[in-house]
Structure formats: C-alpha cells, structure tokens
Amino acid sequence: MDTHTLLLFAATVLPLIAVPGPDMLYIASQAVASNARAGLLATAGVCTGYVLHSLLVAFGLAAVIAASPVLFNALRWAGVLYLVWLAAKLLRSALRPGRMEVPTVKVPSPLRRGFLTAALNPKGMMIYFAILPQFMHPGHAIALQAMLLSAIFITLCALVYSGLSVALATTGKAGGWSDGRRRCVEGVSGGLLIAAAARLAST
C-alpha cells in the first residue's frame, strides 16, 4: 500500500478517535478515579479489544472478496454512507448546547473492562467493516492490507488515549467537556468526515 493511502486513512479515523465515545470516556474515568496507570491499563485493554476486531475483519473481508467482488463494492459504498451519517450526527450534536461530563467510577480490573468495552462495542466493528474497505485494493492481499490499516488505527488509539490518561491523571480532574470544547471538537470532526466521504466517493 502506498504512503498516501495510509496517511489518508489515518486522517479519516483520527477524528473518530478524538471524539468522546464509550472508549474515551471509560479510559478518562479510570485515569481520574485512580491514576495514570489505571488509565493506561484501560487503554491497553481497549486496544487489545480492537486487535480482536482487526483479526475478525481481516479474514472476514478476505472471504467477502473471494465470494463476491460486487458485494465488496457494495460494502465500500455502505462505508461512504456510514461516514456521512456519522458526520451528520456529529454536526447535529455540535449545534446543541450542553456539557459532557466524564464519569469517575473506579473498577477493579481496568484492563479486562477496557477489552470488553472495545470488543463488545458495535461502533468499533462498524468502523472496521465500513471504513477499512475504502482504502483497500481488491487485487492485492486483503488480509494483509486489513491488518496494516488496523495497526495504524490501533496505534493512533494508543497514542491518543495514553496521552489523555497521563494528562488527566496529572491535572487530577477531568472537569468534563465544556460546551465550547465539545461543540468545537464535534463540529470539526463532522466536517472532516464529510470531506473524507466526498473524497472516497469520488475515487
């Protein structure tokens, strides 16, 4: 896979990672309720859960392409529509006022809970099935391409969530997401996803 494709994939998934969701809120809660170590353990658990997703999707997509290239193209267009839907959802949320509070519930095993949070998160699986095919070439080794893209996604998750854990543990409080910060993040992320969907639909 060429570098341009890999960079475009990273730019597409980064807004999804940066937007507060179940994974980020859980990791933040552990960093605030305990310490940076708990946040990092939760991060490791979430990333491990996404490794499971990546293995399932890598071989699942290979089977889909082997069975029907037409079905693969349908999956690609479903992915474009999914990006548009996510973008619209973020933009609508950005127009509504309100803070996003971070829960501070300490759990005895943040690593295991983090794994379950990611492994059982249907949004995570949808990201894999809907977005990864946009950056894959059916004529090449599908499983290998899926694993490479998954590695980029998991690495970005690890970097963003680890930085969040250390930052929150250092300050000692989450303070929630202010109305302005939340709306800014969601608005920018929604716009980036619209741009990504348009770019992918035109190629």
Image (cartoon, rainbow, N blue to C red):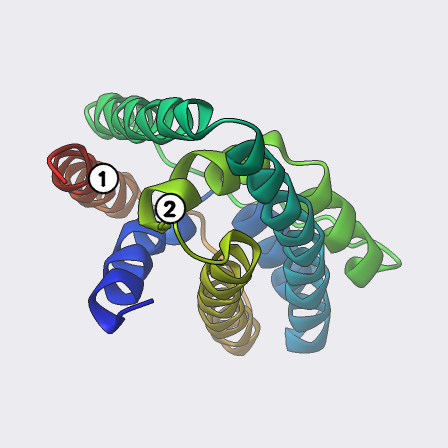
Query: Which of 26 and 170 lies nearest the eye of the viewer?
Result: 26
Residue 36 lies, in percent from the top left, at 64, 75
Q: Give, as a three-letter code, the residue at label 2.
A: Leu
Q: Is residue 116 visible?
A: yes
Per the image, the residue denoted by label 2 is 16
Per the image, the residue denoted by label 1 is 193
> Quick check: 172 above or below 30?
below
Disc 1, SS: helix
Residue situated furthest right in the rendering: 108
Describe residue 102's horizontal placement relative to residue 41 as left or right.
left
> Quick check: 97 above or below 191?
above
Label 1 CA crowd tier, 10 Å (few <14, some 14–19, many 20+) = many
Query: Which of 103 and 60 lies nearest the eye of the viewer?
Result: 60
Tell me whether circle 1 and circle 2 mark residues in contact (CB < 8 Å): yes
Q: Is residue 22 visible?
A: no
Query: What label does residue 183 carry, if any?
Result: none
Describe residue 192's horizontal placement relative to residue 23 as left or right.
left
Quadrant where the N terminus sits is bottom left
Quadrant where the C terminus sits is top left
Residue found 49% across the figure and 65% down from its top: 148
Residue found 79% across the figure and 62% down from its top: 111
Q: Give, as a three-letter code, the residue at label 1.
A: Leu
Query: Which of 157 and 23 lies nearest the eye of the viewer?
Result: 157
Query: Which of 111 and 12 lies nearest the eye of the viewer?
Result: 12
